[in-house]
Image (tube, helix red, strand yellow):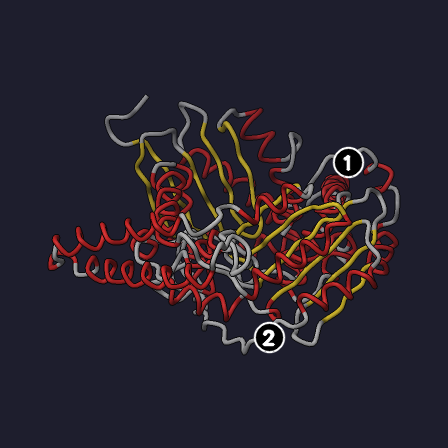
Amino acid sequence: MIRHRRLFFAALPTWVLLLLLPSPLFSYDLASRIQAFTLKNGLRLLMLERHLSPTVSIYIRYRSGAVDEADGKTGTAHLLEHMMFKGTKTIGAKNYPREQKLLLKIEAAGSALDRERTKGMRADPAAIERLTRQLKVLQDAFGQQTVSNEIDRLYTENGAVGLNASTGQDLTTYQVSIPVNRIELWARIESDRMLNPVFREFYTERDVVMEERRQRYESDPDGKLLERYLATAFTAHPYRRPVIGWPSDIRLLDMAYMRRFFKETHAPNNTVIAIVGDIRPPEVLKLVKKYFGPLPAQRLTPMPVTEEPPQTGERRTEVLYAADPKLILGYHKPPPPDFSDYVFDLIEAVLTRGRTSRLYKTLVEEKRLAKSVQAHNGLPGARYPNQFVFFATPRHPHTNMDLEAAIDTEIERLKNAPVSEPELEKVKNQLRADFIRGLDSNAGLAGMLSYYEALLGDYRYLTGYTAAIDKITPDDIRQAARTYLTRENRTIASGVRKPGHER
């Protein structure tokens, strides 16, 4: 689970002093300062007052991601994230009633073009050419009716930094840091985006995502290998699908399904907002109620998610590409807040955290088998059972099989010999240090509070983390390794050079 916290780490000159505080006391102090409220429409608000600078960091998290998409509609959540920056009925609009009429014509032409393309060999080339030309004419005319990038401009001109968004398997996130006297502007923009988004430039943005997929997956050996790994490790669960979507799905994503997806997943009763910084919580609560309170709650009808059946034998897959070999090796395991998830945070640190970790010392420094080796706990998401995964790159002339054997040796050592108390305390200190670094910035705190509240329904996972880590014993590590790091529970993806592309 520590993998997610790393997203929020920042440089921290005083973190060594914070480490001297007993972790339960530190966690209690943090928990006592967080103010949590739930509006009548179900929106959850977390606030933390920190008067370090006249700024505030804000995260909005929707408990909605790629796992919530229907089969055949993969990539919807990611494309929706793009669409949410295209404006609203008032932001980016010159004359919305006129614009709306043109949008309906664009959707009709785009839908007709998609229907014709789905016919495959039976499609009418003349119809495709005519509809393509018609769609382009309508889109060119539409561009004159709107103001592009208006949301970005509003934020930038009012001193915002860190404006960003991301889509994952589990959650969709929007974040920004702004001067504290611009909170009302943020509330007006974001409540309007939740109530009145306009999906402008849908078909052109769909093409942008197709190109993004080509660059990040089809042309990138690392992306291609990870995509194949996940599709092999998960045979039934949606975690097998890439967040960006499968190409054939992206190509035909439609506005009608996206509107339904938005309504059902971006509802206030499926939303967490965390606000951290130079605030007065009563004033901020009043503001949030004013702008977000009127948003109507929705009846949430989550897509049924197929459970991944237990793996009963090793799975292997191979990807050929014109690049250096790479290895991905991983195991199924429970998600948080299961106790074993904390244990795997420690196992990750024991094996690959820093230059003194076991695998780095053995594979990189001593035997020089690998250029790099890294373990990650919690891939590709954390709402459902996930993976503990190793990523490794062999050093020529060694092979992926050499790395696999060396990693196996270290796993057997974990199963049979208890981690020494000095080594265990060292990695616990590393985890505490990383944890506290993540709490230093307003953005780090807002990110983690909103993450755990949206993911697990309880931000207090954050405040109890170090206490849970402190309880882990060498026997806990050995038991987790014996239970989950088994051959029949393992998936291996090997990236190898195509014949004719050797060194």
Which numbered marker is on residue 12?
1
Tell me how far mark 1 sits from mark 2, CA to CA. Answer: 41 Å
In the displayed structure, 319 sits above or below 128; it is above
Q: Position of residue 110 (x, y in %)?
A: 29, 58
Q: How many marks can you see?
A: 2
Residue type indicated by callout 1: Leu
| Mark 2: secondary structure | loop
Q: Relative to residue 126, is residue 163 drawn left or right? A: right
Q: Return the residue nearer the eye: 305 or 294.
A: 294
Q: Residue furthest top?
A: 503
The residue identified by callout 2 is 296
Q: Nearer the viewer, mark 1 or mark 2?
A: 2
Q: Position of residue 485 (x, y in %)?
A: 53, 52
Residue 331 in view in this figure: no
Residue type indicated by callout 2: Pro
**Residue at left 24%, top 62%?**
112
Which class describes the residues within 10 Å of circle 1: few (<14), some (14-19), or many (20+)?
Answer: some
| Mark 1: secondary structure | loop
**Residue at left 50%, top 71%?**
264
